[in-house]
Amino acid sequence: MENEKAGLKDTKELFAGVFAIVKPIVKEIVRDGFQASDLLSFLSSEEFKNEITPAIDGISNVPSEMKDIDLEEIFELAGFSLVEIKDLVKIIKEAKVK
């Protein structure tokens, strides 16, 4: 089992957690600016807790996952990130239309 790959589970959960933080902030910024009350509301939401908990729980495994990352996994992580970035662009475009 010495050569078993670590995979990307915790790294993807970390990326998902980061995007879970960034997307609501971007929504508020493009809607009407980001206020302290927006931050408090967001941090206390169940959605935030559900998204951030797995990211925090597995964060200590990310270095070992990155240590043995291969090209296929890089593309997998890039594809995952691209979907999230497209969502961010959509949020911004929709706000400009309104």
Image: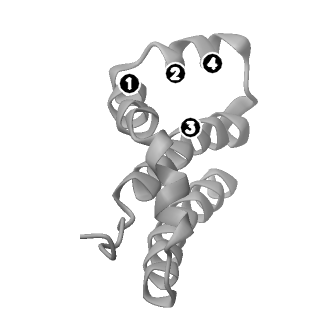
Q: State the SS at label 2.
A: helix
Is residue 51 shown left or right of residue 60? Answer: left
Q: Amino acid at mark 4?
A: Leu
SS of the residue under disc 3: helix
Residue at 45 percent across and 13 percent down: it is 44
Q: Residue 42's mark? A: 2
* Badge number at residue 6: none
Provide the secondary structure element on which disc 1 rests. Answer: helix
Q: In the displayed structure, would residue 39 be above or below residue 94?
A: above
Per the image, the residue denoted by label 1 is 49
Q: Is residue 27 left or right of residue 87?
A: right
Q: Earlier in the sequence, mark 1 or mark 4?
A: 4
Cα gap from disc 1 to disc 2, whole angstroms: 9 Å
Q: Which numbered tag is attached to residue 39? A: 4
Q: What amino acid is at disc 1?
A: Lys
* Label pair 2/4, CB-CB below 8 angstroms: yes
**Image coordinates for residue 7, horizontal then vertical, percent:** 35, 68
Mark 3 lies on residue: 21
Q: Is residue 59 visible?
A: yes
Q: Relative to residue 51, is residue 63 depicted above or below?
A: below
| Labels 1, 2: front one | 1
Task: Give the amino acid at mark 2.
Answer: Phe
Q: Quadrant of the N terminus?
A: bottom left
Query: Looking at the picture, how far across and down is residue 62, in whole percent?
Result: 50, 52
The disc, 2 or 3, on the residue closer to the chain's N-terminal end is: 3
Q: Residue at x 55, y 54 (%)?
A: 63
Neighbor class of circle 1 (other Cα within 10 Å; few <14, some 14-19, many 20+) is: some
Instruction: Say if 14 sits above or below 32 in the image.
Output: below
Instruction: Give the quarter of the image for residue 93.
Output: bottom right
Q: Residue at x 44, y 48 (%)?
A: 61
